[in-house]
Amino acid sequence: MTQSRREFLQASGAVGLLGALPNAGFADSEEMAVMAARPARVQLAPSAYPQTEIWGYDGQMPGPAIRVKQGERVARRFVNELPQASSVHWHGLRIDNAMDGVAGLTQDAVEPGKSFDYDFVAPDAGTFWFHAHNRSFEQVARGLYGALIVEEPVAADVDRDEVLILDDWLLDPKTAQIDPEFEAPHDRSHAGRRGNYIATNGRSGFTLPVKRNERLRLRLINAANARIFELGLAGLKGWVMAYDGMPLAKPELVEGAFLLSPGERVDLFVDVVAESGDMAHLVRIDDQQQYSQTTFTVAGDAAATPRADPAPLPPNPNMEIEGVETARRFRLNMEGGAMGGLNAAELNGERNSFRQLAQANQFWAFNGAVGMTDAPLARLSRRETARLEIYNDTSFPHAIHLHGMHFRELLKDGSVGPLRDTVLMFGGETREIAFVADNPGKWLFHCHMLSHAASGMMTWIDVS
Ligand code: C2O
Ligand code: CU
């Protein structure tokens, strides 16, 4: 039942076969730019369908992208015009804990009609995003997210820079309205809420015109509740330049399929190698079928020959993880879910049977406890390096996200993985990560399959 990483990728077949186929909002503190969350109607499904009612920042879905230069300030007065309390989390940014936007942990949820001022400096260049962090399993699924792009001081050597936000929507096939069963027990206890309608930047058949030998920077963001996107390139030669906003020391040529799990980002540089008059694709692989997630129509030549391979992007400051050998070690066991064999776990400080948990619509546990506990998973002192071994003792994949700090995986061969803020764990896998607790505060650590987070897969780390 448990699907491994390799099976996941092998189920998909060869991608190569498809080969044929300024931040206006900045203002001083007296007059902060407003970002209002409100219901709106957008043409999400093809035009033969009615418009879909979504919740969007400034009534848009995705919300208006925020673009600043590294070291610049981001200031937004978040105004809640929704029928529900909300908050805004700035995913992947190393900022003051008070600005992290986690309702119930770093701030109170902002009630309808109220506002909250977010104000911070963006320390790292890269691809980040913002999204609702109260009832995220509902609010993100209704469209409350957008891209936060922090530009390098010296512009990267590309012809164009495009943000591609991938999402799946669970829509009623007739009315094109969002399925309101956000807390469906089956979704919670299995793979999470999965959509039946897949979009890029909130549109079906998202298409971009390009030229042959043009170099694009594609900033991919997975905003889905639970879908692991399996992607590949056709008619494009690409390199991974950064994961989760953090540049790789050496760009990695894209060969075959790669996975992008909820919350994750990948920055690609791609050269258009398809001929003028042809099409190129960001390919999505789903049940061994290939689809065009994003289509590039090629017309004309940008240059007679392709460019040289890209040089790496400049690293972000103070990302060294030292003292791994002597670091304190912690362990996280992920338990529960359907076919998970969880008999009992602690909920609100009391032992509950699996049946009682199911009645409370809770299905998952971290180290025997469901959801947030009074005591954090780890109490760390400032600048301390910590190692965390994670074991996925469930039958489902989970994308585990740490707020406020990036980590590296300690690989079995003694090397380390790239800097990341999310790690995808398949059933039965054990992985170890290390990070420096360089930012004081209460940092959430949870599954970014948002239905899983809401039904138990959530804990926190205290840094003081
Ligand atoms: Cu993007 Cu706590 O999440
Ligand atoms: Cu999960």
Image: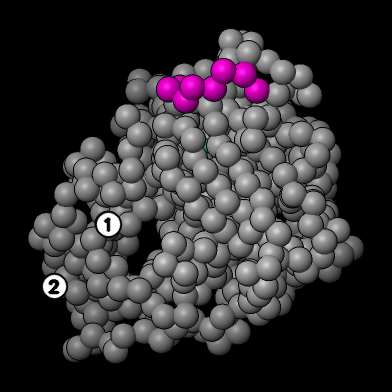
Query: Visible in this render: residue 285?
Result: no
Relative horizontal placement of residue 76, taking residue 282 as reference (left or right):
right
Residue 126 in the image: state x and y as whole percent. 56, 70
Give the Cα separation between the discs numbered 1 and 2. Answer: 22 Å
Relative horizontal placement of residue 301, taking residue 190 as reference (left or right):
left
Q: Residues within 10 Å of mark 1 (few under 14, many from 20)?
A: many
Asked if residue 374 lies in the magenta stretch, the reply is no
Q: Residue at x 63, y 69 (%)?
A: 324
Where is mark 2, residue-wise?
275
Q: Amino acid at mark 2?
A: Glu
- In terms of depth relative to the viewer, which is nearer, 78 or 447? 447
Q: Residue at x 61, y 62 (%)?
A: 434
Residue 458 in the image: state x and y as whole percent. 65, 38
Where is mark 1, residue-wise?
257
Q: Which mark is residue 218?
A: none
Q: Dot 1: what SS? A: loop
Q: Which residues are magenta?
A: 338-345
Whether the residue carrying mark 2 lies under 8 Å from ligand 1 is answered with no
Whether the residue carrying mark 1 lies under 8 Å from ligand 2 is answered with no
Query: Residue at the front extreme?
Result: 326
* Residue 255 to residue 259: above or below: below
Looking at the figure, which quarter contains the N terminus?
Answer: top left
Q: Quadrant of residue 254?
A: bottom left
Name the magenta segment's main secondary structure: loop
Residue 216 in the image: state x and y as whole percent. 36, 73
- In terms of depth relative to the viewer, which is nearer, 156 or 112? 156
- In terms of depth relative to the viewer, which is nearer, 193 or 378? 378
Q: Dot 2: what SS? A: loop
Q: Residue at x 34, y 48 (%)?
A: 5
- In terms of depth relative to the viewer, which is nearer, 459 or 41? 459
Residue 253 in the image: state x and y as whole percent. 30, 73
